[in-house]
Amino acid sequence: MTARPTPHGLEASLLRVEQLLDEVSAALIAGEPLVLEAASTALRQAMADMAVWGRTPAGLQSLDAGMRHRLEKVSLTLSQQRANLARRAVVVDRALATVLPQAQPASTYSGGKAATYRGGAARIYAAAAN
């Protein structure tokens, strides 16, 4: 028989998620990829742990207004962080394209990573990719 989560357990889980969201935000702002990876992994696990509440019979309907507001804020923050990560990825891709320019535009069904660099300025990387 599975243990039923307690209200105190939800409070602790939510507090942990909120702290990890702050850590992820700080890592995004600081541009620290290793810290961002560690915080994101911990956040993903904390969110999975907290998801147990959505599967209980009473579920989230039994929560007070304050807890619902906090959960809505977590949801909003997650969507904002997702958008910020997409923006960061664009910046990194552009910087990478400056450092390692491609000789030809990459085609969808190219022969792998190395094929996009063949004949270009980054030929030494083509051998390493194979």
Image (spheres, rainbow, N blue to C red):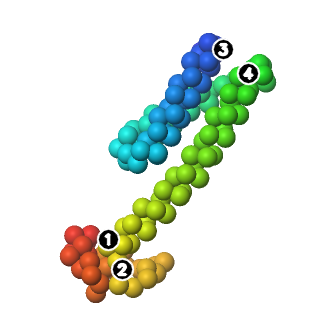
Q: Which residue is mark 2?
A: 102
> What residue do we see at 66% from left, 25% from top?
53
Kind of residue at disc 4: Gly
Q: Position of residue 38 (x, y in %)?
A: 39, 38
Gap in angstroms between the C-alphas marked 3 and 1: 52 Å
Gap in angstroms between the C-alphas marked 4 and 2: 52 Å
Are the residues at dot 1 and dot 4 in contact (C-beta closer than 8 Å)?
Answer: no
Are the residues at dot 3 and dot 4 in contact (C-beta closer than 8 Å)?
Answer: no
Q: Which residue is mark 3?
A: 7
Are the residues at dot 4 and dot 2 in contact (C-beta closer than 8 Å)?
Answer: no
Q: If you read the primary sequence from the N terminus, does the residue marked by circle 4 or circle 2 appear first?
A: 4
> What residue do we see at 52% from left, 34% from top?
22
Kind of residue at disc 1: Val
Q: Nearer the viewer, residue 5 or 7?
A: 7
Are the residues at dot 2 and dot 3 in contact (C-beta closer than 8 Å)?
Answer: no
Relative to 78, say whether 60 is above or below. Answer: above
Q: For marks 2 and 3, give the one nearer the viewer.
A: 2
Q: If you read the primary sequence from the N terminus, does the residue marked by circle 1 or circle 4 appear first?
A: 4
Q: Which residue is mark 1?
A: 99
Gap in angstroms between the C-alphas marked 1 and 2: 10 Å
Q: For marks 1 and 2, give the one nearer the viewer.
A: 1
Q: Nearer the viewer, residue 2 or 89?
A: 89
Kind of residue at disc 3: Pro
Are the residues at dot 1 and dot 2 in contact (C-beta closer than 8 Å)?
Answer: no
Count up the numbered dots.
4
SS category of the residue bearing label 4: helix
SS category of the residue bearing label 3: helix
Gap in angstroms between the C-alphas marked 2 and 3: 55 Å
Kind of residue at disc 2: Gln
